[in-house]
Amino acid sequence: MADFCANKVQALVATSLIEVGVDVPNATVMLIENAEHFGLAQLHQLRGRIGRGAHESHCILISDAHNEEAQERLKILEQSNDGFKIAEADLKLRGPGELLGQQQSGAMKLRFGDLAEDLRLIQQAKELVARNLSGHLERQA
């Protein structure tokens, strides 16, 4: 890794661990095999490791997945560099999973509402609960 950072080695073969803390401004090309196996956020983080310098960069996603869902997910990355838009699209495609459980995707078991569409309402509810809880704690003190 040190030789790659020092520009002594021109290519680096790595696992997805490379996504954390790597800042090599001269890195301009990344090729990700089996891209369909990664989450959109992880792919966005990986491609963020390149293109930090003055040179044009390219992230190449290779996938042999033929199902429509995998193709749609990868298309999102092709069309946007905005992490918020990518996360929102991923949320709509895969679902939010469980807030208090271990499931990281799938539909939530809410009786009413939609986590993606009703975010403002959820934030208002959170603020109201915090205010009421804080008032309740002050009265007890």
Image (cartoon, rainbow, N blue to C red):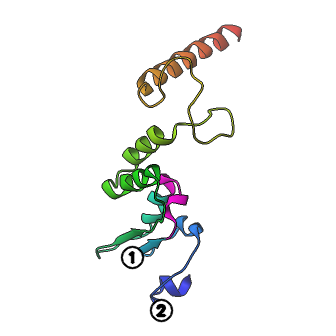
Q: Secondary structure at mark 2?
A: loop
Give the residue type at disc 1: Val
Q: Which mark is residue 122?
A: none
Residue 39 horizontal/vertical position (percent): 52, 54
Q: Nearer the viewer, residue 141 or 23?
A: 23
Q: Quadrant of the C terminus?
A: top right
Q: Is residue 52 visible?
A: no
Q: Nearer the viewer, residue 73 or 131?
A: 73
Q: Earlier in the sequence, mark 2 or mark 1?
A: 2
Residue closest to the far bottom:
8
The residue carrying mark 1 is: 29
Q: Secondary structure at mark 1?
A: strand
Q: Which mark is residue 8?
A: 2
Residue 100, above or below 139: below
Q: Quadrant of residue 74?
A: bottom left
Residue closest to the far top:
139
- Residue at x 34% of width, y 71% of height: 58
Give the residue type at disc 2: Lys
Residue 36 sits inside the magenta stretch: yes
Q: CA distance from mark 2 to mark 1?
A: 16 Å
Label 1 crowd bin: few (<14), some (14–19), many (20+), radius 10 Å: some
Label 2 crowd bin: few (<14), some (14–19), many (20+), radius 10 Å: few
Q: Is residue 31 visible?
A: yes
- Residue at x 48% of width, y 82% of height: 5
Residue 40 horizontal/vertical position (percent): 47, 53
Q: Main secondary structure of the magenta part?
A: helix
Q: Contact (CB < 8 A) between labels 2 and 1? A: no
Q: Quadrant of the N terminus?
A: bottom right
Residue 59, above or below 85: below
**Nearest-to-viewer mark from 2 and 1:** 1
The boundaries of the magenta stretch are 33-42
Residue 121 horizontal/vertical position (percent): 44, 20
